[in-house]
Amino acid sequence: MVDYELSRIIMGIMMKKLKLGDVNHIMTWVNDPEVVKNLQHFNKKFTRKDEEKYVKKILASKNDFVFSFFDKTGEYIGQGGVHQISWENKLGRLSIIVKREYWNKGFAQEILPALTDYAFKKLGLHKVWLMHWKENKKAGHLYKKFGFVKEGALKDEYFWQGKYHDMIRMAIINRA
């Protein structure tokens, strides 16, 4: 099993290993439909008990590494992680969730390289991938800026607000 760094300061954000107490932070965004619409079960109302169960599952997992992110003043800004790791293929899925009040302030631009760095340097992965809504051009631009390339479009992948939506899968390969 790969050891975690308990916390790191990277480019003005602090990245801390997920802990059960972070449920208090997660509850501040987990039922905001605009924030969680990229999650597969975004139509469900999550309870504290649901989140505690989920965090315990993640903490026990050898295929998911999740972090809480804080700004330089210690304010909680969101979560991010490397999930669904296939160790034999050395690949994993990235996730980034930023609380709505911190959108458009550059935090995703700091979290993304921190997670990619962790996936490649600490976990030894060869490739990481992520998905975004086809309509979310801003996300696609950000991921491209950091070296991610489009691998494909997933037609009618998510059903949200009464209609199906396409998702774009993007990935980056560790060339080091």
Image (tube, rainbow, N blue to C red):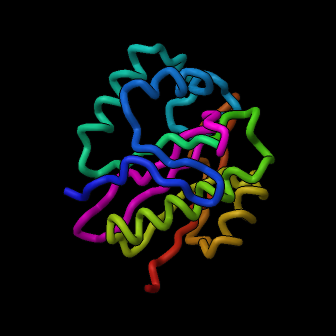
Quadrant (top left, top right, bottom left, bottom right) of the C terminus: bottom left
Up/down of 112 relative to 72, above or below: below
**Residue 156 visible here:** yes
Identify the residue shown where x is 75% and y is 53%: 106
Name the image quarter holding residue 43. Answer: top right
Quadrant, the N terminus: bottom left
Q: Is residue 117 above or below residue 115?
A: below
The magenta segment is 72-97
Does residue 103 sit above or below 33 in this rendering?
A: below
Residue 116 magenta-drawn? no
Q: Is residue 14 left or right of residue 22?
A: right
Q: In the rendering, at what x and y percent does residue 52 appear?
A: 37, 21
Extreme residue in the bottom direction: 176
Q: Is residue 94 magenta?
A: yes
Q: Is residue 152 left or right of residue 133?
A: left
Q: Is residue 20 above or below residue 9?
A: above
Q: Nearer the viewer, residue 120 or 144?
A: 120
* Along the viewing direction, whichever of 34 and 69 lies nearer the viewer: 69
